Amino acid sequence: MSVKLGDDFPNYRLRTTFGNIQLYDWLGNKWGILFSYPADLTPVCTTELSRAAKLEPHFAMRNAKLIGLSCDSIEIHRGWIKDIQSYGSIELPSGEFPFPIIDDSDRKLTRELGMSDPAEFEKNGLPRTARAIKSRSLVDIEAMSVKLGDDFPNYRLRTTFGDIQLYDWLGNKWGILFSYPADFTPVCTTELSRAAKLEPHFALRNAKLIGLSCDSIESHRGWIKDIQSYGSIDLPSGEFPFPIIDDNDRKLTRELGISDPAEFEKNGLPRTARAVFFIGPDKKVKATLLYPAACGRNFDEILRLLDALLVVDHLHVATPVDWKVGDKVMVPPNVDDNEVEKYFPQGVAVKTDLPSGKGYIRTADV
């Protein structure tokens, strides 16, 4: 079962570090942020849960509850929590970690919610959980029918740059295909203005942007003038910096599963959600994002995620929470100590004072 945008999130009975909970009863009338991560006692996940724990009061002030999920047992979660507290210097006045973590050691939820990462495996050969964010009330990434690790389809596209074959147009570059609800709408105007201003930064990273909505090429071209005016965008070449796809027949929107069931056109057809597909030079989907139509995206975060994907793709590293270019990277758990010199001749720093006594927090400069 894949949970789509607008679906009721299943009312699971969950085994957690807070005991057994029925999801709806535990949430009550609050928002829920359910986030998965690959594994306990791993470096990047430690940085993420440390940051989540520090931000938990801010979520609580917004009437929202956090809940984590991995395929580890409750016993492992509880042991690892001590490392998280130590790493993040987290004070817990109540003595309890601020949110529960689900025991999905039977992988039931991971399978049902479609959250496996086909590129990451446990030592026993089972795929690890991907980094997904799900919510009973917020956006759900699994509306998209093209999953992490799939080949993105080689569509023939009608665009403002003319007809293009996607793979030929991309060549050996990264592709950032992003959809939006409609031309001549306020939030979309702000998004495409920001994307146009950042396009040179994407180009420097060997990446091409391409937009998509269910409007015609003629509509796109008329609206581009408003985008230029709104963003005070200077176009020396006279041409908008990236193409916009005409999906007037909604073929791509349907095939990619990126409609927003809460937003409709005047003719009753659902609008396109705000989806983003990161397509690697090998044409595989490296990451996805999905926002509802009413919430604009942060294109600086899209650029930051591309930076992380690039460094992970080119080097044998992982990036910690909130990583940006220039920050230290982390040595992945699948790199044994005897392989460190091979991948990190400049050396690594190992944090040895964790309560678990394990040296899995290894950082390096790149």
Image (cartoon, rainbow, N blue to C red):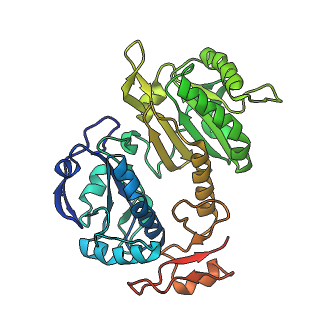
Q: Residue at x 34, y 70 (%)?
A: 92
Asked whether, in this view, residue 365 is left or right of residue 184, the answer is right
Q: Is residue 74 above or below residue 9?
A: below
| Image vertical order of residue 77 relative to residue 323, above or below | below
- The quarter of the image holding the N terminus is top left
66 vs 199: above or below = below
In percent of width and height, residue 188 lies at: 55, 28
Residue furthest right as drawn: 236
Direction from residue 176 to residue 150 in the image, left or right: left
x 26%, y 67%: residue: 105
Image side of residue 167 versus residue 113, left or right: right
Q: Residue at x 48, y 35 (%)?
A: 274
Q: Nearer the viewer, residue 233 or 85?
A: 85
Q: Position of residue 270 (x, y in %)?
A: 39, 23
Considering depth in this image, is 254 or 7 the residue closer to the camera? Answer: 7
Toward the viewer: 274 or 123?
A: 274
| Picture quadrant of residue 141 | top left
Q: Residue 314: horizontal and vertical position, in percent?
A: 64, 63
Q: Residue furthest top?
A: 267
| Residue situated in front as seen by the camera: 82 or 363 | 82
On the question of residue 168 being in view, the answer is: no
Q: Is residue 273 left or right of residue 24?
A: right
Q: Quadrant of the C terminus?
A: bottom right
Query: In the rendered image, is residue 118 in sight?
Result: yes
